[in-house]
């Protein structure tokens, strides 16, 4: 009696000979039963003819040849199921290795035998799909996303390994036959004519969402793209909304659809809007293995003199520098400095000596420094600044974030790297977003905002150096550890609020507050990150474009009607983030993106507030979910809410010692030993220093003295009792106060200092900060206006 594995192998071989998988299925369906039979026979014959010994024979010999072999236990499922899994895995691996994201393929309407019988049109549809896949697989460069509009749900599920799509009922079964035929006609037309439809027609989704354009084709025909850098066309679109799945009811599936350290539904899964449409189309490749970074040559510099005296910072990549700065970062002077948004980093002496002064450092390549030693991971890249690229920390929409290590100094940072391609509009958009992010971040300095260190360009890459926040994002923590307890939620909320109060005090709105963009360090300190879609509000008429992440997006952003209350969109998103922390999912997670937008934008229904939270927590969330922005409290007002106001000392997490000042110094930013590190000077003169001042920026006053920070030599928090934060002072209109506020300001609550006074107090004439935020800057100007009794937004 032959062992079970030889039987199953035999079965397997028979199945193979029949042509397994979707392609085989299609082929079988194309044939009449008799043809099908013939085909099977024919295929079997082919197998026999083409191999010296057919697979069945081989497998039968296996037991004889390997008598000691132990069969692996069979899975509980039938062999067929195992085979489906395997097929999916193979397919997934194959696609991954070819750089294809399974998520770019959208499920086909299920071939419904019961309903349609052997509908030739359907079959052709499958064939069309098959051919698209085949083409894209075989020639990734010739991949055209337009073809993928015609892919439909089933394909996606085959590729992603969703077994239910192959065996179980599918929601796509409900497609009307007529609709299917229309689509499949289009498929046929496309395939036969080889015509590439570059852009869909757009039409407004609803009168309420006039700024929300969706292509006329339905969700199953949306246009994904395989590679963010090569195939994306930055058209206004919301494809991502309906192309992606809603949050799974089963919670976050670990490394499944969000396999990269920081990819996933809530990271950039739902990021939408305007020129950021790229983020809709492009889905990160969740199944691509984490590639080890390719060694990149160390960039060298003409020498210390050019580094210090050249003034302009490292030039932007030539392909990136051409486009104008987006108004999102429209700080005065940005236009002038549009090409100077990356900040030159000091180079170690070795690197400096490699180039002559006349050669632009950024164009010179030297032998990459590749440190190898047994027993530890290779350092695969060494940047000109002496920072070496380590492991992948996470992936964003536009690039990858790596751990950076300076082995000379023993310091770490996060290196956000974006690769640019000259002929790619997507690259230009990436560069533009990065410039915006640099422009904004370089001006921010707060313990609850990730610190910007510097940036540099290297051939086709821009690299931004940021404070390393080791714990990863809230999203990642939720994925790994499940929902947070109320103490953690309270602490995180308070810290997010503090960051927001500061951010809003500079009239900047983040626009993408969500778990994936909030980092947590090992001590539980929280940092706002990812300022890619942040915007500086230059005045009352400044309207916000449609940007953000669907499930976290405020109704007024969806409806393009913020009535001047532009900042409190972040408060709505904060409410969603609290729900996310409490449940692992944002509100309306049962809906897909567009449906969630409709829900939020068209109905004034308050999102469900988790029942298990305390009354204070519920009320806090309720305040955040005030539908009318004018009724929503500001971040400053919310600091006085009982939910976060009285965090007991045991609940107060370790204060932030401030950014890694040594890292900043090594990057030429400020000088920790002689004063407050300067994030970035517009003059780019890194030698200039501030006089010692503990308050270079508005700081949260903590209730307890912070010895750790001072002991660590970093910038301490400021511990001075101040008046409660005044929303008016911070430039918020009276209408932005919440008339429904149910909490009273506390006299001894944590406060934020007067940003103007703190930022500029004790600042000598000509200090770098005065260059960072010039006197005619909106922020400063607004402070003056406010003193004169005017509100910025009125
Ligand atoms: N400073 C940091 N320290 C540690 N990890 C970080 C840091 N910055 C980013 N990461 C990791 O990298 C991931 C992606 O970073 P980030 O969100 O900034 O990229 P992005 O391209 O701007 O993303 P998005 O798609 O949200 O626009 C984060 O979710 C986080 O896990």
Image (cartoon, grey):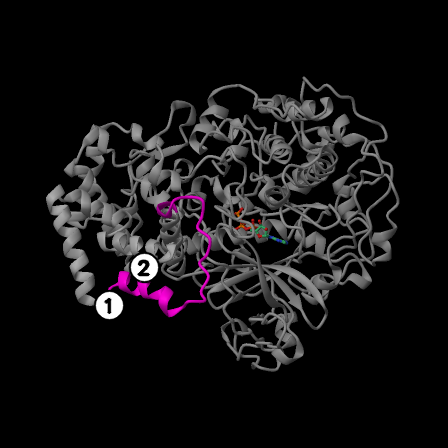
Q: Is residue 667 above or below residue 160?
A: below
Look at the numbered disc 1 and give the secondary structure of its residue: loop
- Name the residue tied to disc 2: 140
Task: Find out whether residue 62 is within the magenta segment.
Answer: yes
Task: Find out whether residue 49 is within the magenta segment.
Answer: no
The nearer-to-camera label among 2 and 1 is 1
**Residue 266 on image: x %, y %:** 53, 41
Look at the numbered disc 2 and give the secondary structure of its residue: helix
Considering the image in quadrants, where does the C terminus appear? top right
- Span of residues in magenta: 53-81
Name which of mark 2 and mark 1 comes first in the sequence.
Answer: 1
- The answer to whether mark 1 is within 8 Å of ligand 1 is no
Residue furthest toward the front? Answer: 1
User: Residue 730: which quarter of the image?
Assistant: top right
Residue at left offset 31%, top offset 49%: 145
Residue at left offset 19%, top offset 41%: 123
**Residue 237 on image: x %, y %:** 38, 39
Q: Residues within 10 Å of mark 1 (few under 14, many from 20)?
A: few
**Residue 58 on image: x %, y %:** 30, 65
């Amino acid at each position: 009696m032959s062992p079970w594995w030889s039987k199953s192998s035999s079965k397997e071989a028979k199945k193979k000979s029949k042509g397994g998988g979707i392609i085989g299925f299609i082929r079988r369906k194309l044939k009449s039963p008799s043809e099908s039979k013939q085909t099977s026979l024919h295929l079997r014959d082919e197998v026999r003819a083409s191999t010296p010994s057919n697979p069945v024979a081989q497998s039968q010999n296996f037991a004889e040849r390997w008598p000691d072999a132990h069969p692996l236990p069979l899975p509980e499922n039938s062999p067929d199921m195992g085979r489906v899994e395997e097929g999916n895995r193979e397919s997934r691996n194959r696609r991954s290795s070819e750089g294809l994201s399974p998520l770019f393929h959208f499920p086909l309407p299920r071939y419904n035998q019961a309903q349609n019988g052997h509908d030739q049109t359907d079959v052709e549809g499958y064939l069309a799909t098959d051919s698209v896949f085949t083409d894209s697989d075989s020639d990734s460069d010739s991949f055209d996303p337009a073809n993928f509009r015609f892919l439909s749900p089933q394909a996606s599920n085959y590729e992603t390994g969703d077994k239910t799509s192959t065996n179980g009922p599918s929601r796509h079964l409900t497609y009307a036959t007529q609709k299917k035929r229309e689509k499949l006609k289009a498929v046929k037309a496309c395939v036969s004519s080889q015509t590439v439809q570059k852009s869909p027609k757009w039409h407004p989704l609803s009168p309420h969402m006039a700024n929300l354009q969706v292509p006329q084709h339905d969700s199953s025909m949306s246009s994904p793209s395989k590679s963010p850098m090569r195939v994306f066309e930055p058209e206004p679109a919301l494809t991502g909304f309906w192309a992606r799945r809603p949050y799974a009811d089963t919670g976050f599936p670990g490394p499944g659809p969000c396999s990269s350290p920081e990819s996933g539904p809530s990271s950039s899964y739902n990021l939408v809007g305007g020129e950021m449409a790229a983020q809709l189309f492009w889905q990160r490749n969740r199944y691509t293995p984490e590639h080890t970074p390719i060694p990149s040559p160390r960039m060298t510099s003409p020498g210390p003199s050019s580094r210090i005296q050249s003034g302009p910072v490292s030039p932007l990549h030539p392909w990136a520098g051409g486009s104008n700065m987006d108004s999102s970062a429209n700080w005065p002077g940005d236009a002038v400095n549009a090409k100077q948004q990356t900040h030159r980093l000091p180079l170690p002496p070795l690197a400096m000596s490699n180039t002559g002064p006349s050669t632009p450092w950024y164009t010179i390549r030297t032998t990459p420094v590749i440190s190898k030693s047994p027993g530890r991971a290779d350092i695969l890249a060494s940047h000109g600044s002496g920072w070496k690229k380590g492991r992948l920390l996470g992936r964003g929409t536009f690039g990858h974030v790596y751990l950076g290590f300076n082995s000379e100094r023993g310091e770490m940072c996060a290196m956000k790297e974006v690769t640019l391609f000259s002929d790619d509009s997507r690259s230009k958009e990436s560069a533009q977003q990065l410039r915006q992010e640099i422009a904004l971040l370089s001006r921010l300095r707060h313990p609850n905002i990730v610190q910007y260190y510097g940036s540099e360009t290297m051939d086709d890459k821009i690299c931004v150096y940021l404070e390393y926040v080791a714990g990863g994002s809230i999203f990642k923590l939720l994925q790994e550890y499940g929902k947070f307890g109320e103490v953690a939620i309270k602490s995180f909320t308070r810290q997010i609020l503090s960051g927001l109060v500061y951010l809003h005090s500079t009239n900047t709105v983040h626009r993408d507050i969500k778990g994936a963009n909030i980092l947590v360090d090992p001590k539980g300190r929280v940092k706002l990150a990812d300022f890619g879609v942040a915007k500086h509000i230059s005045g009352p008429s400044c309207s916000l474009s449609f940007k953000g992440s669907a499930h976290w997006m405020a109704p007024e952003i969806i409806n393009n009607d913020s009535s001047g209350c532009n900042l409190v969109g972040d408060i709505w998103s904060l409410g969603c983030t609290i729900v996310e922390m409490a449940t692992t999912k944002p509100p309306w997670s049962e809906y897909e993106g567009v449906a969630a937008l409709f829900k939020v934008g068209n109905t004034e229904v308050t999102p469900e507030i988790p029942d298990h939270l305390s009354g204070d927590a519920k009320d806090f969330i309720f305040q955040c979910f005030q539908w009318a922005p004018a009724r929503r409290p500001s971040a400053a007002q919310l600091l006085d809410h009982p939910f976060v106001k009285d965090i007991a000392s045991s609940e107060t997490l370790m204060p932030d010692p401030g950014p890694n000042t040594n890292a900043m110094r090594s990057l030429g930013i400020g000088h920790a030993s002689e004063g407050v590190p300067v994030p970035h000077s517009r003059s780019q003169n890194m030698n200039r220093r501030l006089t010692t001042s503990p308050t270079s920026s508005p700081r949260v006053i903590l209730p307890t003295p912070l010895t750790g920070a001072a002991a660590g030599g970093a910038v301490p928090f400021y511990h001075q009792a101040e008046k409660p934060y005044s929303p008016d002072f911070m430039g918020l209109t009276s209408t932005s106060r919440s008339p429904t506020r149910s909490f009273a300001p506390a006299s001894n609550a944590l406060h934020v200092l007067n940003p103007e006074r703190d930022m500029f107090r004790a600042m000598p004439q000509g200090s770098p900060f005065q260059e960072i935020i010039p006197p005619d800057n909106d922020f400063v100007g607004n402070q003056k206006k406010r003193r004169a009794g005017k509100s910025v937004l009125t």
